[in-house]
């Protein structure tokens, strides 16, 4: 749509120079990428006193989740959020998998929040370390072999299509990263067996398991060619755009695009310094996407305090979120945002599991408002 209106008291440029006595509320479609209007309000739209219903902002400490793979080599990750397009899991494997995995439900993105080791795959062994995204295509045989006892993966499963990359448009071929940085493994077939043994492959389809057994290691590939493979990318290699004059929308930092959802990596960046720049994002209700943010390190510019590493927040589509009351003052005291956060924006509503509920912070919704009444009856 080409038309544009301007009525009443507004800024001349969205995301900058909010008129005195107002806050900016971004009402947009397509996750900041479609039609949009900026509304200038007299009160923060998150200045609520209470919320009733499923759209309440939620947060949980994923470090409290205890998947069975944390204590059992034969265990599996624990699912925390899901919809038909994307499932999110926590894996905390301490010992090598006692089986080989083949996911026939979808591609997997393993974000390594903590740990070091190797993912053994059909395509060859792929070392992993903290900050890696390890992408495993649907149907790949693989096995996770940790080098250290403390490993923590956030696993993002794409259920309706392959993991891909967003169109870079005017950014060109080297932003947010050069594709030459993607690391794929060399084939390394397992050595011949010296003693007879049985190898188990677990195949997951429609969240049901089939077990296949061989008397040889299934990772026996001696060579491969093509453009479907396992690969990894570390968040340290990302070089997202920044602006001195205006706050850039989250889509600017998109890392992966999958059917029904995006994966965005917020990364360290300088704060805007222009006199009319606003250093925190506008209030918004993100009506086409549920928004999940996993804190790897630091804090987002819309917060005045760190939520803690491993925190997972869920902001359902339709309800406002944005700067908490003290975020404006906090941002003015800093020169940079020093943080890495993994953001999953999903088109379909996400459901939470009992594992999510068991690790939930019941007062998170109240941190957006100085008028909210917490669970314990006090003020936020």
Image (cartoon, rainbow, N blue to C red):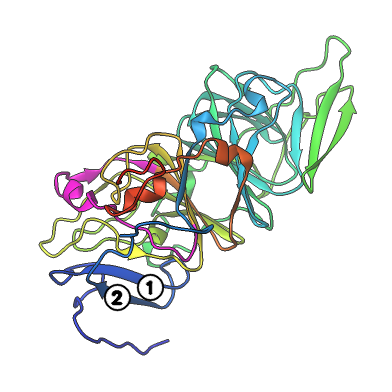
Residue, x 19% and y 78% (percent of image)? 12
Indicate the position of residue 55 as horizontal and vertical percent values: 50, 59
Which numbered disc covers residue 239? Answer: none
The residue stretch that appears in magenta: 316-340
Q: Nearer the viewer, residue 354 or 175?
A: 354
Rendered image quadrant of residue 197: top right
Mark 2, secondary structure of its residue: strand
Residue, x 78% and y 29% (percent of image)? 220
Q: Quadrant of the N terminus?
A: bottom left
Going from N to C along the chain, the mark reached first, 2 or 1, is 1
Q: Nearer the viewer, residue 22 or 298?
A: 22
Distance from the alpha carbon under mark 2 to that under mark 1: 7 Å
Q: Is residue 177 visible?
A: no
Confirm or deny contact between disc 2 and disc 1 (CB under 8 A). yes
Is 39 on the left or on the right of 259, as rendered? left
Q: Height in image: 330 above or below 316?
A: above
Rendered image quadrant of residue 218: top right
Residue, x 19% and y 69% (percent of image)? 22
Which numbered disc covers residue 39? Answer: 2
Crowd class of label 1 (few under 14; some 14 to 19; many from 20; radius 10 Å): some
Which numbered disc covers residue 27? Answer: 1
Crowd class of label 2 (few under 14; some 14 to 19; many from 20; radius 10 Å): many
Q: Residue furthest front?
A: 377
Q: Nearer the viewer, residue 12 or 307?
A: 307
**What's the magenta bit mostly, secondary-structure-wise?**
loop
Rendered image quadrant of residue 109: top right
Is 164 on the left or on the right of 328, as rendered? right
Indicate the position of residue 93 as horizontal and vertical percent values: 61, 24
């Amino acid at each position: 749509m080409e038309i544009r209106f301007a009525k009443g008291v507004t800024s001349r440029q969205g995301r900058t120079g909010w008129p005195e006595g107002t806050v900016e509320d971004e009402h947009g479609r397509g996750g900041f990428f479609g039609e949009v209007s900026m509304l200038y309000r007299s009160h923060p739209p998150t200045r609520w006193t209470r919320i009733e219903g499923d759209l309440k902002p939620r947060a949980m400490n994923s470090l409290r989740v205890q998947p069975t793979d944390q204590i059992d080599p034969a265990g599996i990750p624990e699912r925390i959020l899901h919809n038909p397009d994307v499932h999110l899991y926590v894996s905390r494997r301490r010992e090598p998998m006692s089986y080989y995995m083949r996911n026939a439900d979808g591609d997997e993105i393993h974000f390594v929040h903590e740990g070091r080791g190797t993912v053994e795959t059909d395509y060859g062994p792929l070392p992993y370390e903290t900050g890696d995204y390890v992408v495993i295509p649907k149907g790949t045989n693989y096995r996770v072999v940790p080098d250290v006892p403390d490993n923590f993966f956030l696993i993002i499963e794409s259920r309706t299509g392959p993991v891909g990359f967003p169109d870079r448009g005017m950014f060109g071929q080297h932003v947010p990263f050069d594709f030459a940085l993607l690391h794929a493994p060399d084939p390394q077939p397992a050595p011949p067996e010296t003693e007879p043994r049985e190898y188990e492959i677990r195949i997951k389809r429609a969240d049901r398991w089939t077990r296949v057994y061989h008397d040889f290691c299934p990772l026996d590939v001696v060579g491969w060619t093509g453009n479907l493979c396992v690969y990894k990318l570390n968040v340290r290699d990302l070089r997202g755009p920044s602006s001195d004059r205006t706050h850039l929308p989250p889509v600017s930092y998109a890392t992966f695009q999958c059917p029904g959802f995006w994966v965005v990596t917020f990364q360290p960046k300088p704060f805007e310094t222009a006199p009319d720049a606003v250093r925190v994002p506008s209030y918004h209700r993100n009506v086409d996407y549920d928004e999940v943010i996993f804190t790897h390190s630091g804090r987002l510019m819309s917060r005045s305090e760190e939520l803690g590493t491993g925190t997972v927040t869920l902001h359902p589509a339709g309800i406002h979120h944005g700067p908490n009351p003290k975020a404006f003052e906090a941002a003015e005291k800093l020169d940079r945002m020093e943080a890495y956060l993994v953001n999953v924006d999903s088109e379909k509503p996400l459901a939470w599991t009992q594992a999510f509920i068991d690790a939930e912070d019941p007062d998170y919704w109240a941190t957006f408002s100085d008028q909210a009444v917490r669970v314990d009856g006090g003020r936020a």
